[in-house]
Image: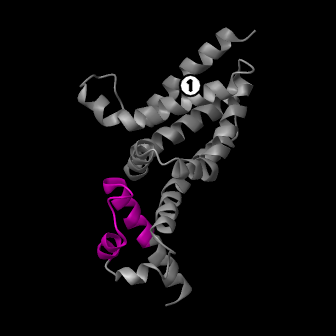
Amino acid sequence: MSQAAKSDTRERIMHIAASLFSEEGYNGVSMRDIAKAVGIKAASLYNHFDDKEDLYLAAIESVFRERVNNLDRALKSKGTAQERLLATLKAMMEGNVSDPTSTKLLQRELISGDTTHQKWLTERLFKEPFNQMVSLLEEIGPKGRGETNAIYLSALSMGLGLLGPLLEQLGTSAYTTDADVISRDITNYFVSDALEKRP
C-alpha cells in the first residue's frame, strides 16, 4: 500500500471511529466495531494505530483540529479587538452548528469524567486558543478580567452548542443557530458591558 493510500485509509478510519465514539462513547465501541464499519479486518487497524486508545485520541484530535484551526485564524485575524472577538465567537458558533460529531464527543468526554482524556484535550487542543482569547479580552477590558471573561464566553458559546437540542424544544423565536446573529449579540453585549466597567 502506498503512503498516500495508507494516509487516506488512516483518515477514513479516524473519521468513522470519531462518529462511532460520538454515538456510543469510548467504552461502547470496540476495535471490531470500527473495523466492521470501515470494511476491513480488525487486525488491519493495528497497521495504522497502536491500540484503541491511540485511535481514539487520533480521532478526537482529527475532529477538533479543524475547529481549533478556525478559532486560531479568527483570533489572529486583522481588525480591532472587537472585530476579532466577533470573528472568534462566530468560529466557535459555526463549529457548534456545523460539526455535531465534535459536539457529541465533547459531551461524552465531559460526562465520562475521564480526567486523563480531558487533560490531554486541554493541553493538546484547547489551552493555546484559550490563552489567545484571554489576551484578546484583556485588550477589550476591563483589565485583569481577561481570564474570567474568557471562561464565561467559552462556557456560553459551548453551552449553546451542547444545549442546542433542548433549547430548540422550547419553541421560542429567540433561539437561533445563526452564527452571525449569536456572535454579534454576544460581542455587543460583552463589549458594552466591558466599556461600562472600564475605569
Q: Residues within 10 Å of mark 1 (few under 14, many from 20)?
A: many
Residue ID at (39%, 47%): 108
Q: Position of residue 1 (x, y in %)?
A: 49, 90
Q: Is residue 36 above or below residue 135?
A: below
Q: Is residue 11 above or below residue 164?
A: below
For this rendering, which residue is in front, 106 or 101? Answer: 106
Q: Is residue 189 above or below residue 108?
A: above
Q: Position of residue 174 (x, y in %)?
A: 34, 22
Q: Is residue 108 magenta?
A: no
Q: Amino acid at mark 1?
A: Thr
Q: Quadrant of the C terminus?
A: top right
Name which quarter of the figure residue 22 lies in.
bottom left
Helix, strand or loop: magenta stretch: helix
Horizontal side of 122 relative to 131 (left or right) equals left
For this rendering, which residue is in front, 84 or 155? Answer: 155
Element on which disc 1 rests? helix
Q: Is residue 36 magenta?
A: yes
Residue ID at (67%, 45%): 128
Q: Position of residue 32 (x, y in %)?
A: 32, 74
Q: Position of residue 148 (x, y in %)?
A: 63, 25
Residue ID at (25%, 25%): 170
**Magenta segment range?**
12-38
Residue ID at (39%, 58%): 26
For this rendering, which residue is in front, 110 or 178? Answer: 110
Tally of numbered discs: 1
Q: Which residue is mark 1?
A: 187
Look at the image and tell me whether residue 177 can be seen.
no
